[in-house]
Amino acid sequence: MPEPPSSRPPSRPDVVPAGIPSTSLGVMAGAPAGGEVLEGPADVQLGEAKTARAPSAAIRRLGFAFWISVGWVALVILLAVLANLLPLDDPNGIGSSLPKQSPSLQHLLGTDSLGRDIFSRIIFGARVSLIVGFTSIFIGMVVGGTLGLIAGFYRGPLDAIFDGASTVALAFPALVFLLAIVAAVGQSLFTVVVSIGILSIAPLFRIVRANTIVYAQREFVLAARALGARRIRIMAREILPNVLPTALSFALVAVAIAIVAEGALAFLGLSVRPPTPTWGGMISEGRTSLEQDALICLWPSLALFFTVLALNFAGDRLRSFFEIREGGL
Amino acid sequence: MRARRDRQTTGYPAAPETSGPLLEVADLTTHFRTGRGMVRAVDGVSFSLDRGRTLGVVGESGSGKTVLSRSIMGLLPRTNVVRSGEVRFAGRELTALTEAELRDIWGVEIGMVFQDPMTSLNPVMRVGRQITESLRHHLGVDRAEGRRRAVALLDSVGIPEPEQRLGDFPHQLSGGMRQRVTIAVALACGPRLLMADEPTTALDVTVQAQILDLLARQQRERYMAMVLVTHDLGVVAGRTDEIAVMYAGKIVEKAPTRTLFSDMKMPYTEALLKSIPKLADPSHTTLSVIPGRPPDLVNLPTGCRFYPRCPYAQQRCRDEEPPLQEATTPGHVYRCWFPVGTPEGRDALDRNRREGRLDAGAPVAPAGA
Amino acid sequence: MAGSGTAQLRTGDALLRVEHLVVNFHAGPRQRVHAVSDVSFDVLEGETLGLVGESGCGKSTTGRAVMQLPRPTSGSVRFAGQELTALKRGALRETRPQMQMIFQDPISSLNPRRRVVDIVAEPLAIWGRGGGAERDAKVREVFDAVGLDVDAAGDRRPYQFSGGQCQRISIARSLMLDPRLLICDEPVSALDVSVQAQILNLLADTKKRYGLTMIFIAHDLAVVKNVSDRVAVMYLGKLCEVAGADDLYEHPTHPYTNALLASIPEPDPQVRPSTNGAGLAGEIPSPVSPPSGCRFRTRCPRAQDRCAAEEPQMRQMRPDHFVACHFPVESPVSFGATRSTASNQ
């Protein structure tokens, strides 16, 4: 029964638009729609004294699965950061062991067709995936988010231009763009990060702009203007804190999409040059021996799958969490 | 008898008539399980309502009045609700029905009008279809007949050019017009009971007057019973036969409308009435306020639930919960140890005045929450 | 009604003097919303002006145009001797602390992500006024003035408060800069009657304590009468009637004022609301294409041909009682009489 609390004015723009623009490649598409229905009596919620929500309650409300997801991502990050300190085999040590060994104590996940330790390669490969995922979305967030905040706050001709440009950018086939850049500049980690970052600007711009427009119409923004707050201050102090939670939870989902995109590039041989291990590259290499030894392909696929799933889930859960808070329950 | 004849002549299905009141609520209790504990939103409410009569339910936010109306309808969340008591409507026990069975009663036997027309109307469906849909679904009328009746309904709720309005979406209408449409939707199947929950709270005074007049006229013409839920005693004063005042989940006073205003017994009713600004008073008259806020429905005070805010409160009010007792006028009941207008009440008030604790120790604005 | 003119303006020093205020909005291609059309009024120091009318009459737009949020299309707004419409952005900003505003939606007017103590302290932070201790003292003072305990409430966020409490927080924030003029835009419309009384009394106390001048905007005449010294009735972007609060209620002269009075629900069952069209029939016309002449004529029971042809000007009916109507209600005796007048259609 999602009825609004009875004594509240009806026209409150409660709903944060989680507008998720799709792209031609479907790179940014498919983020599950969040939003949880408020259950509970309408006028009871208001009359009762509302106690401050303790942090532990928030932790519980996010759910067990959320913390599992966060734990997984944290584990992957930790392993990737500490890879050099861990007693791992050389990920690029061709021929140091027999090829295509089954998992054993010495090689936890076995070895690949060149005799390299798969476990070690997955952990080193996580570095590429994580760097690409987080750095590119960070670029997209800073550029797209800033533009979205400005466009959504000022509106007018500037907004029309940015919005039109984002529509064009979203219509441009992402894969073609990536291929063109790599072909022109040459493949490197930097190229991959920047090009995926550029691709993420338009969708992140859209999210931030849509949310900014909603909050810019709220009366607390008008109140700040009436107090004489400068526009920069209004954007930074009044609007940004409201837009950021939604934007960040969407960014987590975007990181997952970027990781998949890097995997796809690596699969096509367009990401970081071999022999540097990447998950996509490992899947691509394992593909040739798929029939004899499916495990070589399976391990990096699982790593990719669980990391992307965890990021998606955590981002989605966070978004609905913030929407409920907004609902005032 | 008249109700039956009306229904037959208008072609609505005649439901079996039974003797006794149309709606009978007995000891209805509705609690919600929350993280903080049990929220006792409705706590043992009983009343009955005859055909063609209007009951006003008045209370502040948090008094449980909205939950009461939803609980009667069976429109409650599926989880974490504890409901007990009886709701008999036209001889059927609503609390025993499944949701599928209730759906044949909602909108057909009982119409509903809510505070915000924008949430009760489907924003992406044309006005005409919202009306004809329930007609066709519940009454099985064909398309042309549905349209004819929809036009007649819109006309009867005072919407100009009803044929053109059929093709409009809700957002194309003004707030008052939207509320007229929700009334038309509620009346479409010829309900015998209309539940109106704060139907005019979101509207201007001028439109409020129009909508209340409309509801009163429809109720009279159709010989419906009506429950009018509101926070404003002014809204129900001229338009109801009986008024129940709710506080913290309980009915604290119930009386025929004239009696309630002329001979109120409950200090809460008196305080509520006094807090309304009156036109007859000169400007800058200090309004008398009810200090504090309604109690937390999880941690209710012992004794009388109003005592922390009551100017009449005595030690006894803190210790013992007053039962529902009868006043001299038939049908007038109240819960108070020191009723308004009685020697006991006057003494209590004087004592509090002398001792300077009119607010019963409650600060005018409680800190925090 | 619904006329123009400046007869209602008083000579001498008013804190705020608004003349020929016009606010138009663009609403799509070649469509213009005439939200406020040639409205003039003044507010003396220490006075409360009530601005009353239905939704869509332009009363909120008028309040915001006074604040220059946004700037009006044309007209003059003189505040404390300064012509606000002529000020550049920087100079206008300097005047902001002297004028503050409270809004209808108590929850929407507070930033949901900030602690209420920060929300209330924000005005000082914006202006860089006062040090930490000084700020704390001021925050404590205004919290106290609105009846909230800063220690118990300060660390919470707006959604943890009821509507009435949020409105108190809004009032506290508006007091931080010691304004001279407070514009209250429907501050009690979203509240229960019991809470409404608390907030109305609080506003009256606050006004006294801080020596405020107020513009109080509402749609409920009973509420407006309670807080105002002078009342201006608005309809569809025009003023209908301006008079002292008590005088207006004793001698409502404009047919629209009479209709508004008749719509107020009386908490008295003896006054059976007549259901034969008392109050006001129909709806307010679109401000995109307002009626010619008197804008109220389409709903007015007294309308004649002249009302369509000629716009009524403000004229004095009694001492300090002005009305813009060709056929004013001359001498209503009591409220009963005004009711029947309004229903004689």
Image: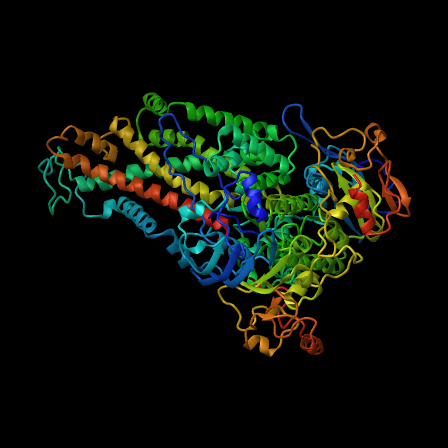
Q: Among all residues in the image, which is located at the extreme left?
A: A98
Is residue C69 or residue C178 the one in the foreground?
C69
Based on the displayed image, in which of its 4 quarters is residue C198 positioned? bottom right
Classify residue C80 as left or right of residue A58: right
Which quarter of the picture shows residue A305? top left
Classify B186 as above or below B256.
above
* Residue C235 screen position, x and y as percent: 75, 39
Image color mode? rainbow
Q: Is residue C304 left or right of residue A201?
A: right
Residue in the foreground of this view, choosing between B67 and C100: B67
Against C208, residue C105 (above or below) is: above
Q: Residue at x 56, y 42 (%)?
A: B187
Residue A86: x percent and y percent? 21, 48
Question: What is the total number of numbered labels drawn onto the structure image?
Answer: 0
B253 sits to left or right of B137: right
Check the image and report above or below for A57 versus A309.
Answer: below
Residue B13 appears in the figure: yes
Q: Position of residue C133 (x, y in %)?
A: 61, 61
Residue A217 lies, in percent from the top left, at: 59, 40
| Residue at figure coordinates x 57%, y 36% from the top left | A153
Whether residue C138 is visible: no
Image quadrant where residue B167 sits = top right
Residue closer to the observer: B113 or C221: B113
Image vertical order of residue C68 relative to residue B313, above or below: above
